[in-house]
Structure formats: structure tokens, C-alpha cells
Amino acid sequence: MIRTLLKTLCFFTCLTLIAPSAMAGGSETEQQKEQTSKSEIKGDIEAASVGWELLEEGALLIDVRSVKEFESGNIEGSLNIPHTNTDALAQAIGSDYERKVVVYCHSGRRSGLAQKNLEKLGYTGIFNATGYTALLATKP
């Protein structure tokens, strides 16, 4: 009796897990597509949105990825200065240590390093908008 009950329970559990995908014909649901596209985004969506606000206010935009990454796609109007070249970053920003500057890379790690290095030099207006795809996903 218990064995039959367990088999029945197992059958209905499997049915509930399999039936929705079978009824959808095996195609992705809108929720799955949304989750997939979100998982492909590297960086922080909220930070990227703030980055766009700063850009609309006239901030300088710097892509700190490699030249090869930059050439494979970038945000229009951005300068390309690799994160390891702090002197060139400082030169591009200039002597206004409060100038609003938005930096980005692939995921936010390198732009975070660039931000820290520039802040060590005294720059206070540097904002890490994190990843390129996060910026693309939140473009107004």
C-alpha cells in the first residue's frame, strides 16, 4: 500500500515537472528568455543606469578594456584607455579632479581598478558603470 502510494506520488511529481515544457512544445518561455538574457549581462544594471544619467549630464566616458575588446564593440563616444595605463587615464581627464567620468569594462572589475587608481591620484568624480553589456542593456 505504501509502495503504491509512493509510486503514485512520484508519478504525479514527475508529471508536474515535465508537463509544462511538453505543453510549450519544448520552446523557451518568456520568463526563461528573460532569465537567459539577464544571465548574459555582465555588470550591475543599477550602476549602468546611473552611468547613463551621468553621461546625459556631460560626463566623460572611458572604456578601460583592451584595444581588441574595444574594437569588437563599444559605447559610442567612449575613449579607449586600458585600465593599466593610469597616466593616460589621468591625462584624458585633465586637471579638473572633480570632473565627472564614467568608466566601464567587461564586468566591472577592471573599471573598478581604474577608479581606485584614479582616486589615489585625487580624482573624486570617477564612477564605475561596470560592464559593457550592462550599459547596452540599460541604454536610454
Image: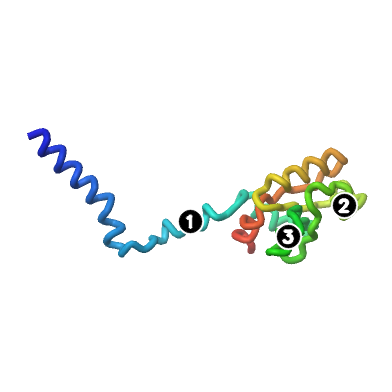
Q: Are marks 1 and 3 in contact (CB under 8 Å)?
A: no
Residue at numbered disc 1: 36
Residue at numbered disc 2: 88
Q: Residue at 80% of width from left, 60% of height from top?
A: 79
The residue carrying pointer 1 sits among few (fewer than 14), some (14 to 19) or many (20 or more) residues within 10 Å by Cα, namely few
Question: The C terminus lies in which quarter of the figure?
Answer: bottom right
Instruction: Identify which residue, 120 or 109, lies in the foreground.
Output: 109
- Amino acid under disc 2: Ala
Label 2: element kind: helix
- Amino acid under disc 1: Thr
Q: Compared to 16, does 26 lie above or below?
A: below
Instruction: Identify which residue, 25 or 119, lies in the foreground.
Output: 25
Q: Residue at 73% of width from left, 54% of height from top?
A: 65
Q: Is residue 123 left or right of residue 73?
A: right
Task: Indicate which label's residue lies in the foreground, 2 or 3.
Answer: 3
Residue 71 image offset from top left, x and y in percent: 73, 64
Q: Is residue 41 left or right of residue 36?
A: right
Quadrant in which residue 139 is drawn: bottom right
Q: Residue at 47% of width from left, 54% of height from top?
A: 35
Q: Is residue 44 left or right of residue 102?
A: left
Residue 92 image offset from top left, x and y in percent: 87, 55
Q: CA distance from mark 2 to mark 3?
A: 18 Å
